[in-house]
Amino acid sequence: MNELGGIVAVMVGVAVEGPYSYRVPQGMCVRRGSIVAVPLGARLTLGVVWGEPKDAVSHNRLRDIAHLYDVPPLSEELLGLVDWVARYTIAPPGMVVRSVLRSTEALDPPRPVVAFRATGHEPEKLTPARLRVLDTLNDGSAWPKAALIGATGVSASVIEGLERVGAVERLEMKPPPVVLPPDPEAMAPKLSAEQQAALGHITAIDPHSFGVALLDGVTGSGKTEVFFEAVADTLRAGRQALVLLPEIALTNTFIDRFTRRFGARPAEWHSDMTPAQRAKVWRGVLEGTVRAVVGARSALFLPFRELGLIVLDEEHDGAYKQADGLNYHARDMAVVRARNARARVVLSSATPSVETRNNANLGRYAHVLLTSRFAEAAMPDVKAIDMRTDGPDKGQWISPVLAREVFTAMDRGEQALLFLNRRGYAPLTLCRSCGHQYQCPDCSVWMVEHRFRGVLMCHHCGHEVRTPMVCAQCGDADSLVAVGPGIERIAEEAAERFPDARRVILSSDMGNHAQLRERFSEIERGEYDLIIGTQLVSKGHHFEKLSVVGVLDADLGLAHGDPRASEKTFQILTQVAGRAGRASRHGKAFLQTYHPDHPVMQAMVTGDRESFYRHELMAREAGGLPPYGRLAALIVSANEHQIAMGYAKSLLSVAPMAEGVRLFGPADAPIAQIRGRHRVRLLARSGKDFDLSGYVRFWLSQGEKLTGNLKVQVDIDPMSF
Ligand code: ADP
Ligand code: ZN
């Protein structure tokens, strides 16, 4: 990249639509991608040099760049990613730049330390002070200046004198690399034939070119082992590797596993880190000393220089979609970034998203299959329990069949898991006298009772009240009832029915990350017989003694009018059933359902994944839904419903005509009120080759100016619709 002079355009890290012009002071040497501080209003702000200014600007009104940071310029590939994300998600480019420059502490350059070393050349004049210095240095080591002065008690001028006569030499000690590089040869596993073949398909993609592989393998088949070898292959080719995980905070086991395989901890990137830790990683990635990163989705914005591989573990996971601020999906962004960086992508899952499966079917992605579990572990048997005929007694949630299986597992010294994907004690508190239902005052959802903590809580805004003793509406005492089960209620029933079991509840309300990690280790050590948990237990963990899994309400996710409901339910049921029998014990999973004939339950029981994907893709095609069409959601919100609805209607009236675009709404959003803001939704649907982002951007520019507290949020490719 050429040196730029005179006037340059700088994209500042604030939500602005385009770069601003600044003057380059004499003697400063900037290029496209250089990271600088520039005055903006009364402050200095971080920015990235974008290039030549587009328009002629008058010299005398311009301000100077205040500071050029001592780090390599950002790569062309990363700058291209910023442009793409801004255009696709309809976000101001400055906001995307802010995501890239997240770790500003990294920009305080670690200062090299001045040190001295003996040259072996004897000075003619030897004073006692000079002798002390040379004695100290006589083993050939280099001493930082301050340490040398401290050790010898001489003044700086003595050392400088020795330097002048050539008896010692000055060197600069660079700070050491912050992370030990991973070693691809450290502890390679012996892959099974099937795993070796899978790896071969991935490494067949040239390490210096773009390509995507779907690593589609049943739980426990060794997907992690295989993509670790893809990481090793990338490191050997001299390129950097990024592994993304959905639930980074709870992945000690993953980090340990990586460390064992590569003989060094990977650099981590997630929200639990201190600013100083982030700073080191950010800078190390930019300078190339960090070779492998394990992180959450925001790691996609790290300034890699030689990115050769991006792995998305559990690629179907909803946590990859960021929903506030920048609305991007990490999977799409990974593919875009890899294309620009000429890197490989591995999407790994036992239950790939319908979109990814479609791309594999069409041959856009290599479809790499692992069909059996590693070693002697077999897939669990899945059975449906028909709750219409075989349900439990009134007031209970655990059916007799499931209870029997739990006892059997315990008798054999194995573990059982009772799974319900709902936090708290009960989703609804109702007054039997007057019918009053406890709702959040600011959101249109019920307050969930958390008995353990003695509160009712809104799961959207976090609003809490103490659990009431009398009805807030009619004042009756003893008339309030808890309706429906949450995980705490299941734990209460389990305590009555399995009093001798060593039990543990796992949900995000049950402690901080460190405490939850401790619970997981206890389970792995076999300190519990019965695990009662939410989605938290469904991912990634490997409990060797677990042989029976009971899903208390397999229909839970199907109730919503969301066209992705089947896919999401299939994914979570497969994940949780897959916890059973991961080692040599044979596993069984039981699904309590009122709809045993539903295609999802059928696919689970018969193990016929292919028919599920076929069925689901057909339904999507018929509805013109992704991956056969594109969707964008516009959420108009305001403090008053009427204002939000009024604006949405006016927006609809100025919608540009375009062939193949259909608009729906305005209607109340699925959650019509959040934190006191009323939300109205417009949906746009188009064919899959249409530039829907461009259409929505133009549409919004036609709308009236937003006034008061009106807000419009755009979500391209919304996850629920
Ligand atoms: P997945 O990611 O598909 O769920 P894992 O990679 O976690 O599967 O593998 C499941 C278990 O089998 C792990 O304990 C893993 O260490 C073990 N395993 C898989 N493949 C191998 C192998 N080639 N050599 C040794 N152990 C393996
Ligand atoms: Zn609320």
Image: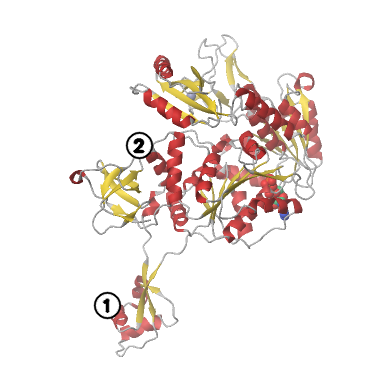
The residue beneath circle 2 is 17
Q: Secondary structure at mark 1?
A: helix
Q: Which quarter of the rendering shows the N terminus?
A: bottom left
In the foreground, 244 or 488: 244
Label 2 within 8 A of ligand 2 by Cβ: no
Q: Which quarter of the rendering shows the C terminus?
A: top right
Is 690 positioned to the left or the right of 704 in the image? right
The residue beneath circle 1 is 157
In the foreground, 498 or 635: 635
Of all residues, the one furthest to the bottom in this rendering is 124
Question: Are the residues at dot 1 and dot 2 in contact (C-beta closer than 8 Å)?
Answer: no
Residue at x 40% of width, y 80% of height: 137
Residue at x 37% of width, y 87% of height: 121
Dot 2 amino acid type: Glu
Q: Residues within 10 Å of mark 2 (few under 14, many from 20)?
A: some
**Sequence-earlier tag: 1 or 2:** 2
Residue 563's x, y, as percent?
61, 25
Is 506 positioned to the left or the right of 446 in the image? right
Residue 639's x, y, as percent?
39, 20
Label 1 within 8 A of ligand 1 by Cβ: no
Q: CA distance from mark 1 to mark 2?
A: 55 Å
Q: Secondary structure at mark 2?
A: loop
Image quarter of residue 206: bottom right
